[in-house]
Amino acid sequence: MALLAALAWLLTVAQARDMGPGMEPGTMGLALPLFLLLWVVMMVAMMFPSVAPVAITWARAIGRQSTGVVRAVRITEFAGGYLLAWTAFGLAAYGALAGAGWLVEQDPAAGHWLGATAFLLAGLYQLGPLKSVCLRHCRDPFGHLMRYAGFRPRGRDLRVGVHHGLYCVGCCWGLMIVLVPLGMMNVAAMAGLAAVIFLEKLWRWGPWLGRGIGVAFVVLGVLAVFQDWMLPGLQAAQHGGM
């Protein structure tokens, strides 16, 4: 999974360079299939480092009952289910991005309010109870792994991946939406968010870090109404409309 994450980062950086700084806001002019392909690559890059410990734990749980080949297949199913959950979120993200891009094209000033809303929504979610519930699951999934052992054998690993992936989406979707104002292909922003996600899930003080990030996002949401430089993901359309 670490190797796949490293390869995904290389592909993401290369794609960001190809697109250049003048890409359209919102869906960046991408059709849905290409967007989803790029989205999955981004999720592998950003999420696999933090989900690897769960995959390792699950692999150890099934390792006593499986040969090496069977174990590899089952872990692949787990990773596929995990990415399936994030792909479903990618569908919702595409619709939201398409709507945001359309609004900015109609009224360039709307970019300020869209950016501020994204920061504020992300910040408030970071401080809310649902974030805490999902983060607790991601930080300590062992109780659920015991529950997963009771799933029916057919398709169990795929279902385990989907189930854990949905908790992960619940934990991290608020962080992902700040890519709307920061830019969907902003590699620096993606790397920073990936580091936050990794530390939230694995560091001892991760929950406190998440709350601190939430407060910072609320502050950025207020400032974004007045500061263009904070909205690189929306500036291209604003400049094009002037």
Image (tube, grey):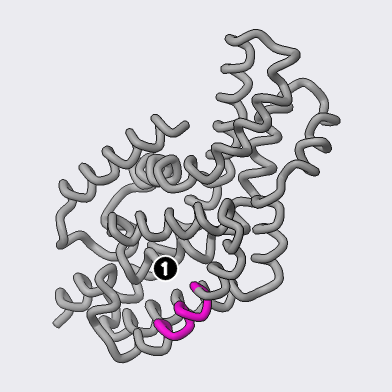
The residue at the point 65 percent across, 50 percent down is 138
The residue at the point 60 percent across, 10 percent down is 68
The residue at the point 38 percent across, 70 percent down is 100
Residue 6 to residue 92: above or below: above
Q: Image check: 203 left or right of 98?
A: right
Q: Image check: 126 left or right of 8?
A: right
User: In which image quadrant can residue 157 be found?
Assistant: top right
The quadrant of the image that shows the C terminus is bottom left
- In the rendered image, residue 240, in percent from the top left (x then y), is placed at 15, 74
For mark 1, what is the residue?
A: 178
The residue at the point 65 percent across, 58 percent down is 135
Name the foreground residue: 149 vs 198.
198
Residue 33 in view, yes or no: no
Residue 109 to residue 87: above or below: below
The 10 Å Cα crowd at callout 1, few under 14, some 14 to 19, many 20 or more, is many
- In the rendered image, residue 60, in percent from the top left (x then y), is placed at 68, 25
User: In which image quadrant can residue 230 be found?
Assistant: bottom left
Question: Residue extending furthest front?
Answer: 204
**Which segment did they paint magenta?**
213-221
The overriding secondary structure of the stretch rendered in magenta is helix
Residue 32 to residue 121: above or below: above
Name the foreground residue: 113 vs 208.
208
- As for residue 94 lying within the magenta part, the answer is no
Q: Which amino acid does label 1 sit on?
A: Val
